[in-house]
Image (cartoon, grey):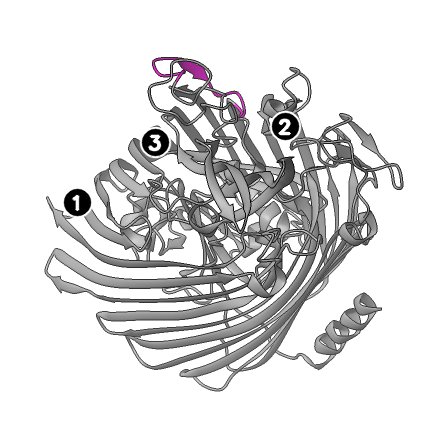
Amino acid sequence: MKNIFIQKIICCLIIIGCNKVYSQDDTSKLNTYESLSLKDLLNVKIVSVSKKSESLFDAPLSASVITKEDIRKAGCTSIMEALRLAPGMIVREQSNGNYDIHLRGMDNVPPNAPFDVTSNTTTLVMINNRSVTSYLRGGTFWETLPIDINDVERVEIIRGPAAALYGPNAVNGVINIITRQAEKDGLYVTANMQQGSNLTFINNASAGYRFNKKWDMTVSGNYQGRDRTQISYFEFARNKWLKYPDYFITFNGDTVRNVDTRYPDPQLSMHKYAGNLFLNYEPEEKIKFNFSAGAQHSMVQKVSTENEITPLSTASSDSRYVDFRATVKGLSAQFSYNGGVQATDYDPGRKYDFNIVCGNVEYKFTKANFSITPGLRYTSAVYDDRKYSDLINKTGLFNGRGQITTQSASVHGEYKMMNNKLRLITGFAVDKFNYPDTGYLSYEFAATYKLNKKHLFRAVFSRAPRSSNIFDTYITKTIAYYPSGYKNFTRLALEGNKDTKLLTADMVEIGYRGSLAPGLSIDVELFDINAKNYNTPVTSRPYIQLNGTDTVNVTPIRSTNIPLELRQQGITLSLTYSSKQLEVKPFITVQHTRMKNYAPFINTPDAGTPGATQNNIYSGVGTTMILNSTPAVFGGASINYIPIPKVNVNISAYYYSAQTYYHLSNILFNDGVRGIDHISAKLILNASITYELVKDLKFFCSAKNMLNDKSREFFKTDEVPFMLFGGIHYEF
């Protein structure tokens, strides 16, 4: 019923619309990206690389831009899926519409850890420079983004550490989603509706009004409903897929009694809807004020650590946000709030409230060929699950109130010389956290040399840390509690560690961009990344607690830094060919990742004891092994062809080589079978055909995974079969 109601609203919006929508672009506001030449493609603007509008060709870092036209022509059903159009991205589907997303890989690190420890907590995701990072464990809950494909002007991707510009968590890079706005006076409406296999519905609509050159307003809404491609679940203990009501048992053999509560709808993959308001005021040149607000609701089945029985959990979120940005000549400021209630699993006690407040101010001084920009940033993230938890037995999610605060000071500068051929960029930032109570230095040194209009060389050296999070810092959770004698009990407990060092990555990169021939360009990047200070829950020395007249023997499993260091070296190659009717964009990354000093012993009695020589986290010191969980080769291609006017044909491909994932259950069962998943190489081939029936009304049909390779893409999750979609896109 909700889906039908939302579709009716969208149809009403289409009927009342009358003017064409144009996209936001700082320098070419009427460019719709419909038919770009190679020169136009190289000059697409990007702001995330150096916090100013510049052409993609001149950007000093490895970067890519996915435009709204790229998304539409490829028939993408979500922002997550659209990331497969960019080089350097590893995007693997867990269930219909839910993805595991990594920049350049370095995933499943350390091996044999819980899912959330090894998920992507090293990429900073932003909407209009507003961080959408979760501080629960780090990373991004993509299903909770309030915007969808209809709101996107472009997605800017920076590969490599960028914390000197944007703060902690930009360890592997930045994904900045830029929303669009009205650029022509009057009323406009735009809508995109798709329906397809597995009861998949994707509906987006926007309506806006530009009052004059100074004021404009837009409201938007989006809805996604998706069913799973199967109704069975993989169970760790029995090492097989089971259908309801045959599942589930826990590790100790007890039958789970609340299956219906934890899995209220086994067929559900995603149900989400959201609304947004955007206000923009530009009283004069170089003075801008932008305000946005919105709310979202989502319920999905995706991979979660909180479920000890099967990889998929039912997670939900209700959140809202407010964001205000101001630019007054050289001064820029941004203040944002994001808060709500989320549940990582439908099991009672897995819910929490959160409130995140962030503010930053910068001022840019410019003189001739030199500029310098100092800035200040403050973030406070408060997470509280006390009203949902049993605080006596500590069976909630983390059982308390935790706060992560970050105070940052930064400065970045730029100098041009040799008739602007040589460009030097530098940036420093110091981030002071409440826990660990220390400061972390980020830096970036970049240089570009523009030989001429067709050839540019670049080099980068940078460092970035990850932020602390609630779980690693504050968790105090009882895993097991049982009698071990007269008035004597044993408690197995997860514990946080306020002194955990933060993951830090260093990178050296060199690159080249060039125009090789009329219509043909190339982008090459060679990178070398070294990361250290990984942490994972580790069994630590027992201690004794007194509870009245009872004695409790506590075995803590505490967040602990392990000596593991990661070294990743690789090359990414991208080509672009463009003619009047044809555009081809192939790209590939080849990488080699090694782990040093890794040992799989995290739950043995002396696992975290320094000085022990066997079966602990230090017993792997001096060893080197290849990380097989990140594919050695991944990439894709996009081919866009206009055979006749009004018809557009798009074929996109995405590929990754074979990999092996090691889950925590590998150590718990320790039989060489359970907890290990060998994921096959996979080529995903998609196609989309668009026909413009009348001006601004486009009908399209999309086919996903045309080879019908149903193999799973993530550890013991759903198969991904062929899917067929049809829809309309309307702008007027």
Q: Residue at x 45, y 86 (%)?
A: 212
Q: Main secondary structure of the magenta part?
A: loop
Disc 2, SS: helix
Amino acid type shown at disc 1 = Leu
Callout 1: 10 Å neighbours few (<14), some, many (20+)?
Answer: some
Mark 2 or mark 3: whose residue is earlier in sequence: 3
The magenta stretch spans which residues?
A: 619-631
| Separation (CA) of disc 1 from disc 3 | 28 Å
Disc 3, SS: strand
> Which label is found at residue 510?
none
Q: Which residue is mark 3?
A: 532
| Separation (CA) of disc 2 from disc 1 | 49 Å
Q: Is residue 623 magenta?
A: yes
> Which label is found at residue 665?
2
Q: Which residue is mark 1?
A: 424
Say whether residue 156 is left or right of residue 235.
left
Amino acid type shown at disc 2 = Ser
Which quadrant is home to the N terminus? bottom right
Which dot, 1 or 3, sits closer to the camera? 3
Q: Position of residue 297 (x, y in %)?
A: 66, 65
Which dot, 2 or 1, sits closer to the camera? 2
Give the residue furthest to the right. 245
Q: Is residue 671 above or below residue 60?
A: above
Mark 2 or mark 1: whose residue is earlier in sequence: 1
Say whether residue 325 is left or right of residue 74.
left
Q: Is residue 13 above or below residue 360?
A: below
